[in-house]
Amino acid sequence: EPEVTQTPSHQVTQMGQEVILRCVPISNHLYFYWYRQILGQKVEFLVSFYNNEISEKSEIFDDQFSVERPDGSNFTLKIRSTKLEDSAMYFCASSWGGGSTEAFFGQGTRLTVV
Amino acid sequence: RKEVEQDPGPFNVPEGATVAFNCTYSNSASQSFFWYRQDCRKEPKLLMSVYSSGNEDGRFTAQLNRASQYISLLIRDSKLSDSATYLCVVTPSSNTGKLIFGQGTTLQVKP
């Protein structure tokens, strides 16, 4: 069964450093997403990406964050100048269509900022 | 008011019990509705979509009441493997595929 894969599974970084979280969406999917989940809290939408551009972003997704699809298979989330409060599980997801189409989630990257 | 609100639980039930979860959403223009399941420290996985006519998948039944902005999930004959957090999820009126999650309801099924 096709799946969304994320690397690394766990990343520890020092405050102020930049991190890049990587995702390989399901190959025929067209919509890509990043979500985050702070420990003990709900899953929060960060950004959606379609046709090589951001289609929607949340208030959380400020200038500290950026996304890129550098080639035909990878989808990355870059977090610049990390803060302690960026520590969370980051989930990548993809779907064939937008709207009500089922989204498939990767297993997540646990980011710990120290 | 939270966009999607759920009773966090936990719900502790014996095997074989029937348990019901409720959810309310604030935006009347919300378009699509789902229940996801999340195991501890794992990714959310789609359990089922929710339709106004109600829908059933084996032991699971979901209902949507658009007038009351209320969604429910009924689990019959609970199994130990049903222990997880159940997430109520809606999509807003935009068509970008964005999902809005509730905080989840934790279910613990005990032998």
Image (cartoon, coloured by chain):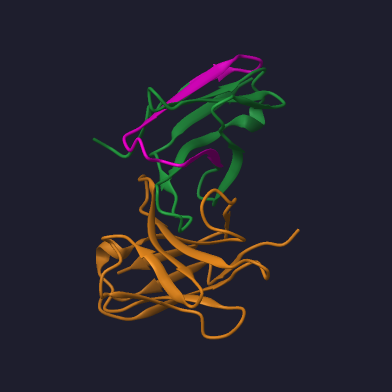
Q: Quadrant of residue B51?
A: top right
Range of residues picked out in magenta: B12-37
Q: Quadrant of residue B59?
A: top right
Query: What residue appears at the point 31 percent right and 76 percent down from the top-left corner?
Result: A14
The x and y percentages for residue A67 are 41, 76
The x and y percentages for residue B38 are 53, 43
Query: What residue appears at the point 44 percent right and 76 percent down from the top-left corner?
Result: A53
The image quadrant where one finds the C terminus of chain A is bottom left
The x and y percentages for residue A4 are 62, 64
Q: Is residue B13 magenta?
A: yes
Q: Is residue A92 left or right of residue A25?
A: left
Query: What residue appears at the point 51 percent right and 52 percent down from the top-left corner?
Result: A99
Q: Colour of chain A?
A: orange
Q: Nearer the viewer, residue A75 or A20?
A: A75
Q: Is residue A54 magenta?
A: no
Q: Is residue A31 left or right of residue A56?
A: right
Q: Is residue B43 left or right of residue B26?
A: right
**Farthest residue in the bottom direction?**
A70
Q: Nearer the viewer, residue B46 or A11?
A: B46
The x and y percentages for residue B50 are 56, 33
Q: Which chain gets the green colouring?
A: B
